[in-house]
Each structure stands twice: as C-alpha cells, then as structure tokens.
Image (cartoon, grey):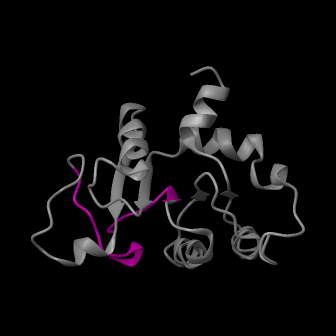
Amino acid sequence: MTTSQAGSVSSDWQDPTTIDRMLDDAQTWAVVGLSGDPGRTAYSIAALLQERGKRIIPVHPVFADPGAPAVLGEQGYATLADVPGPIDVVDVFRRSDAAGEFADQAVAVGAGGVWFQLGVIDQDAFDRTTAAGVPMVMDTCPAIEWRRRGR
C-alpha cells in the first residue's frame, strides 16, 4: 500500500448517499480512458452507462486527432478541459498512480463528481477533491453498485 492509499477506510470512499446520487441524478459522464477499444473495461462500462440513460463523453488523448472516430455514437475529446458544457461525473479508468491528476482536472472544470473505478485508489486525490466540495467515489464500479442495488 502506498502512502496515498494508507489511512482511510473504504467506506469513506464508497458513501452510499454519494453513490446513489451519482447513479440516480448524474446524467453526463465524462469517461477518462475511453478510447473506443471494445475489449477494454472502459468501453463496456460506458455502454452500460448509456443503457442506463446516461450521456457519455469519451476522454482520451487519441481524440487530439481530428479524424478520430466517435465512440458509442459520441464525439470524444483529448482532455477534460476540451469538453464543452457541464460534466456531472468524471469516471476515471486510469491506474492509481495516474488518476489523481484527473480528479484535479475534474475540480478545475467544475464537474459535479468524480468516480475512480474498481482498484483505483488515491487517498490524496480523494482528500483534495472532497475538500474542494466535489463528491468522490473510489474503488468501485457503477455496474457493481447497480447490481448491489438490485437494478
């Protein structure tokens, strides 16, 4: 365990009220790491979000190329700062050691929440993000949480 992972109980990261609010109320999800590769978990979770009525916005450096194709019918963007309009949740598919910068970017663009996927933990990023007033969930997945709720 790294120092950024030490010192917290996972329940702090997985507050049921925060999870419910994101799953129920958040409509626009920017999915960091969604490149369009259907073999990647980011793709299957983005497709699930769409099935649940959410709008997804792919965010990946591949979209710096103006010829990059749409993913799941949505135009992608190279960075969160490039996304026009409001973002309800930034859903991060990156390793723990690279994820924190996306929490910071989410705060900078005024996102309503941050979700780090299963296995992605950065206590320092959690502390910074929540201190900035932005709710955050770590180390779980919308698919797991919907299943847990029986939906």
Percent x, y of residue 11? 83, 49
Q: Can residue 24 be seen?
A: no
Percent x, y of residue 1? 80, 69
Does the magenta run of residues contain 90? yes
In this rendering, position of residue 126 left or right of residue 78:
right
Q: Can residue 136 be seen?
A: yes
Percent x, y of residue 27? 45, 45
Q: Is residue 47 above or below residue 126?
A: above
Q: Quadrant of the C terminus?
A: top right
In this rendering, position of residue 1 left or right of residue 59:
right
Does the magenta run of residues contain 18? no
Q: Is residue 85 above or below residue 22?
A: below
The quarter of the picture where residue 83 lies is bottom left
The quarter of the picture where residue 4 lies is bottom right
Q: Is residue 31 above or below residue 151?
A: below
Q: Is residue 121 above or below residue 39?
A: below
In this rendering, position of residue 111 left or right of residue 79:
right
- Magenta-tinted stretch: 74-91
The quarter of the picture where residue 99 lies is bottom right
Q: Nearer the viewer, residue 96 or 79?
A: 96
Percent x, y of residue 98? 56, 76
The structure residue drawn at horizontal position 76% and vertical position 55%, both measured from the top left corner, is: 13
The structure residue drawn at horizontal position 69% and vertical position 64%, both measured from the top left corner, is: 121
The structure residue drawn at horizontal position 68% and vertical position 56%, both measured from the top left corner, is: 138
In this rendering, position of residue 76 left or right of residue 137:
left
